[in-house]
Image (tube, rainbow, N blue to C red):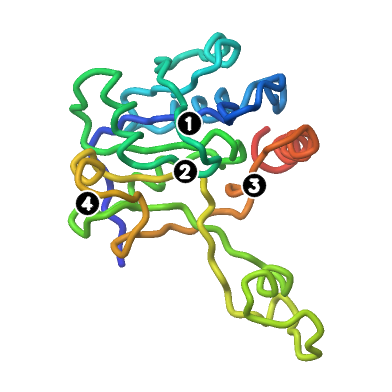
């Protein structure tokens, strides 16, 4: 199916804090000298369709690090560490004033390895006429990912070489695109009408501790950016 180019469609980006985890007050994680939210803001700013950027955090030190975006100091009163409820996301969006943009892109900051152009590619690939939302996918390569997904047993002898396997795709947890109207109506961002666009596997690499941050830093230096 052909992608529909956004053209004159505009978007507002909401960056989710990488550090507002209940009970956690550790020092901010940094990759290549920047906090996680800094990488998400930079990626959003590179997308021509993104007109406004907001960062949702309830940490003073993280808010102080935000540049080129509006900080929304809204309580992270949610007990999970994955994607927050859509109703809560919309309450945060409302804090930045009237939403006049056509699209909403949500960026969890724990995945800082977004390739240049990935956000615009997701915006361009989203089909509002289909409805629902769009998420970035990555290909799970090798037998290990299939074992974890329950498709093979660990000790089977007929495991194939990676190049001979059929591809399996997973939500990268990195870029979500929808419309403000859809967010108002639905309880979950992902559902039966969710669309997908496949990007490089590094887009789904999640940084949750110092080791992850150092691996991501090395990846940025050698693969993603000059």
Please report the residue visible at 73 percent of the width from the left and 70 percent of the height from the top: 144
Q: Is 218 left or right of 52, judged from the image as shown?
A: right
- Name which quarter of the figure residue 45 lies in: top left
In the rendered image, the vertical position of residue 84 relative to residue 198, given as above or below? above
Determine which residue is flagged by label 3: 205
Of pointers 3 and 2, the one earlier in the residue sequence: 2
Of pointers 1 and 3, the one earlier in the residue sequence: 1
Please report the residue visible at 34 percent of the width from the left and 41 percent of the height from the top: 86
Marks 4 and 3, Cα distance to the nearest angstrom? 27 Å
* Disc 2: CA contacts within 10 A as few (<14), some (14-19) or many (>=20): some
Report the quarter where the N terminus lies.
bottom left
Please report the residue visible at 25 percent of the width from the left and 49 percent of the height from the top: 186
Marks 3 and 2, Cα distance to the nearest angstrom? 15 Å
Give the mark toward the camera: 4 or 1.
Answer: 1
Q: Is 96 left or right of 32, judged from the image as shown?
A: left
Label 1–label 2 contact, CB within 8 A: yes
Give the mark toward the camera: 3 or 2.
Answer: 2
* Disc 4: CA contacts within 10 A as few (<14), some (14-19) or many (>=20): some
Determine which residue is flagged by label 4: 128
Residue nearest the viewer, comparing 71 with 79 = 79
Residue at disc 1, secondary structure: strand
Marks 1 and 2, Cα distance to the nearest angstrom? 9 Å
Q: Is 66 left or right of 141, judged from the image as shown?
A: left
Of pointers 1 and 2, the one earlier in the residue sequence: 1
Q: Which mark is residue 118?
A: none
Q: Which mark is residue 83?
A: 2
Determine which residue is flagged by label 1: 16
* Disc 3: CA contacts within 10 A as few (<14), some (14-19) or many (>=20): some
């Amino acid at each position: 199916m052909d992608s529909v180019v956004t053209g004159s469609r505009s978007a507002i980006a909401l960056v989710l804090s990488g550090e507002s985890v209940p009970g956690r007050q550790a020092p901010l994680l940094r990759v290549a000298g920047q906090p996680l939210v800094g990488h998400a803001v930079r990626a959003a700013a590179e997308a021509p369709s993104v007109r406004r950027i907001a960062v949702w955090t309830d940490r003073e030190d993280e808010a102080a690090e935000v540049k080129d975006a509006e900080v929304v100091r809204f309580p992270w009163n949610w007990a999970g560490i994955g994607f927050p409820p859509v109703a809560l996301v919309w309450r945060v969006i409302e804090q930045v004033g009237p939403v006049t943009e056509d699209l909403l892109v949500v960026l969890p900051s724990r995945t800082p390895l977004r390739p240049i152009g990935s956000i615009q590619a997701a915006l361009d690939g989203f089909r509002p006429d289909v409805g629902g939302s769009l998420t970035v996918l990555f290909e799970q390569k090798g037998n290990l990912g299939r074992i974890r997904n329950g498709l093979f047993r660990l000790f089977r002898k007929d495991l194939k070489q990676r190049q001979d396997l059929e591809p399996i795709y997973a939500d990268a947890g990195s870029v979500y695109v929808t419309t403000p109207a859809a967010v108002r109506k639905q309880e979950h961002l992902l559902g039966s009408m969710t669309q997908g666009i496949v990007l490089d596997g590094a887009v789904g690499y999640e940084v949750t501790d110092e080791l992850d941050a150092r691996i991501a830093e090395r990846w940025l230096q050698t693969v993603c950016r000059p």
